[in-house]
Structure formats: C-alpha cells, structure tokens
Image (cartoon, helix red, strand yellow):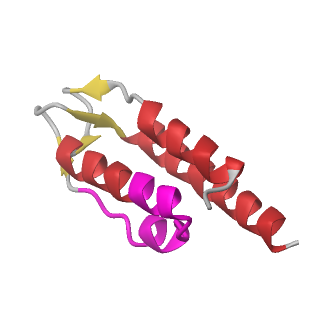
Amino acid sequence: MTSAVNLELVETIRSVRFTPVRIREGYAMNAVDELLDQLERSATRGLPLQPLLDGAHFPTFRWREGYDRVEVDEFLVEIGAAAALGTSRQDQ
C-alpha cells in the first residue's frame, strides 16, 4: 500500500518545473527528466529514493538549453530530505 508520504512525494516530483537556461551552464534536460521519472516510479512503489539521488549525475551544457543547476540541486536535496523523513516516520 502506498503511504500518504509517498503520494505527496510522487505529486511533488510530478509537478516540479525548472527554469530553462541558455547562457549559464545548465543540466541536460533529458537526463534530469529521466531521473525524475525514475524517482516517481520508485516513490509510487514505496522504494527508497536515496540510491537514485546518490547516483545522480547530469551532463552540463552552455549555449544549449538546460535546466538551472541550482534549482535542480536544491530540489533533489529537498526530495531526499522528504523521503528520509517519510521513511523514518514509517519505521516507527
């Protein structure tokens, strides 16, 4: 059964939008989108997200459209913290 915490994580992951950048260095959009899809599937199944987050590495581009690196990094930290909090609550 999927917990309320996991459903909230799934919705947060599904709804996130990052600012596209071109002049500054940005993360490859397809690589970030692929990780988000993997995170969503794992959260839906109640699987741990931290292994995916720990292994995340994105190619960077300049002068090509990419996602704002700071926004992506901050979001991933936020998701990791929320997943850890949800896991610790479920373990009690």
State the image quarter where residue 18 is shown: top left
Where is residue 90 shown, x and y percent of the image? 78, 66
How many marks the image carries: the answer is 0
Q: Which range of residues does the magenta coloring cover?
A: 39-58
Side of 7 where 90 appears, left or right: right
Side of 52 where 2 appears, left or right: right
Per the image, is 51 magenta? Answer: yes
Residue at 49 percent across and 56 percent down: it is: 44
Q: Residue furthest front?
A: 1
Where is residue 74 shown, x and y percent of the image? 54, 44
State the image quarter where residue 33 is shown: top left
Task: In the rendered view, tell whether residue 49 sits above or below residue 59.
Answer: below
Where is residue 56 shown, x and y percent of the image? 37, 64
Task: In the rendered view, tell whether residue 87 sits above or below residue 64.
Answer: below
What is the magenta segment's predominant secondary structure?
helix
Q: Nearer the viewer, residue 56 or 16?
A: 16
Task: In the rendered view, tell whether residue 86 sits above or below residue 75.
Answer: below
Q: Residue furthest right?
A: 92
Q: Please state, as top left, top right, bottom left or bottom right, where the C terminus lies in the image.
A: bottom right
Residue at 53 percent across and 70 percent down: it is: 47
Q: Please state, as top left, top right, bottom left or bottom right, where the N terminus lies in the image.
A: bottom right
